[in-house]
Amino acid sequence: MPLLDVVFLLLTFFIYAMAVMVRADALDVELSPVAGTGGPSGAVEHVLRIEADGAMTYNGEALSADALPAVLDALASDRSGPTLFVALAQAGVGEDGITAVDRAPVLWSLLQKVETAGLTRVSIVGPPAAP
């Protein structure tokens, strides 16, 4: 009977050890750079850029967090169905090779505001392509 207890104890230990061995690492996601088609397309582009520090610009002009819902509401009410391009600026890389800035909370908050405004066409893109 004591041998059976030892076997169950070892089984419990190895099951727990397997659960603890699982690593939860964040994956680095490469976003394709923003590249134009080389000429005017006739369509108005709507680019919201999120900087590494969380600051936002809309079509090259500074945009405060208070003014963002008005811009999103205007885009959502446009009958032409514009696409909002959310460009993530290049973040700095630390000594260990890992991106030093976490913009997920800013991006998550933005996507919630986009959903609240009713905007259905949103594309998340990387930084502008080098010329």
Image (cartoon, rainbow, N blue to C red):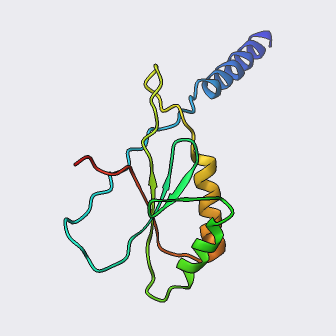
What is the residue that sits farthest to the left in this orientation?
38
* Viewport quadrant of the N terminus: top right
Which residue does the image show at 44% across and 78% down from the upper left?
82
Q: Nearer the viewer, residue 17 or 113?
A: 113
- Answer above or below: position of 40 versus 107: below
* Quadrant position of residue 34: bottom left
Q: Nearer the viewer, residue 36 or 64?
A: 64
Where does residue 53 sit, x and y in percent of width and height?
A: 57, 42
Which residue does the image show at 48% across and 89% down from the upper left?
79
- Answer above or below: position of 36 versus 74: above
| Relative side of 96 to 17, left or right | left
Which residue does the image show at 55% across and 75% down from the upper left?
119
| Relative side of 76 to 5, left or right | left
- Answer above or below: position of 74 versus 45: below
* Quadrant position of residue 29: top left
Where does residue 74 sit, x and y in percent of width and height?
A: 57, 79
Where does residue 20 sit, x and y in percent of width and height?
A: 64, 24
- Answer above or below: position of 61 versus 43: above
